[in-house]
Image (cartoon, rainbow, N blue to C red):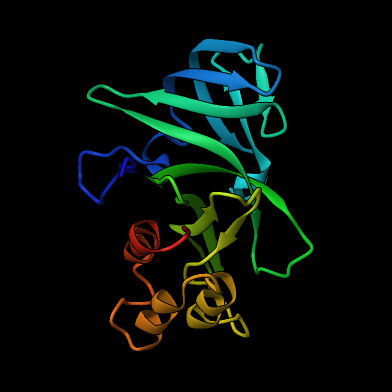
Amino acid sequence: MKYLYLTFVFFIITFNSFSQKKAKMKITLNNGKIVSGTYKIKSRTMGFPSKIKITSIKGREKYSLDDIKNVIVYTKNSSIYLEVILTKKYLKSKTIEKKLAEIRLDGDRIKLYFVSEISYRNYNTFTTVSRYYKKYMKKEKDSVSYNIGYLYGAGQIGIKRRVRDYFTDCPQLIEKVENNKIPKKDTMLIALFYEQNCGN
């Protein structure tokens, strides 16, 4: 079985660490053109990834998510691969958004993506800002990635329900998550189990 497994180790440079900072990048555009140079990843509106643009240092080149297929960001000791993906919040959602995502598991049967988001909380005299990841999975034959991680806010559909909805082709995975043999928030274990045991 051949797949790329990027685990949670400290040397991996994530989206959070180079967002808004200049870095060497190679950008593959949807028209097939490849551009290389020093760029910044910028958020235009409150940090939401769907509003991201990548601009050159002098601002002469600007690329939106509609223009980009994938990006390789080069750091001092490594590189990180980002891909523009189509996403849904729920399986039956009609709204589809483009996101700039880091690939954490690149399997033959399923892919796991992490998308950096920003959370703003307003208090009486100040606003706090924090970063977190939304986690998406996409099966081999799918074109849209599905949110399978924790969702903030009241009234959201729970993870176990979303696992049942999405993995109807893998009842053994549903059973393990339902019985807490695989922790519902451990998206890497969920994806690895599917990759190794399901989707035939």
Q: Is residue 85 left or right of residue 175?
A: right
**36 vs 132: above or below:** above
Visible residue check, residue 123:
no
- Residue drawn where x is 34% and y is 89% of the image: 179
User: Residue 1 location in percent, x, y?
Assistant: 30, 44
Residue at x-position 72% and y-position 32%: 66
User: Residue at the location (40% across, 86% down)?
Assistant: 178
Q: Is residue 111 left or right of residue 30?
A: left
Residue 178 vs 56, above or below: the answer is below
Picture quarter containing residue 17?
top left
> Outermost residue, bottom direction?
179
Asked whether the viewer can see residue 166, the reply is: yes
The x, y position of residue 87, in whole percent, is: 64, 54
Q: Residue furthest right?
A: 94
Query: 32 or 67, which lies in front?
Result: 32
The percent coordinates of residue 195 (x first, y second) are 38, 56
Image coords of residue 34 (percent x, y):
58, 12
Residue 157 picture quarter: bottom right
- Residue appearing at x 54%, y 15% in the figure: 57
Left or right of residue 39: residue 192: left
Number of marks in picture: 0
Nearer the observer, 132 or 115: 115
6 vs 9, left or right, is: right
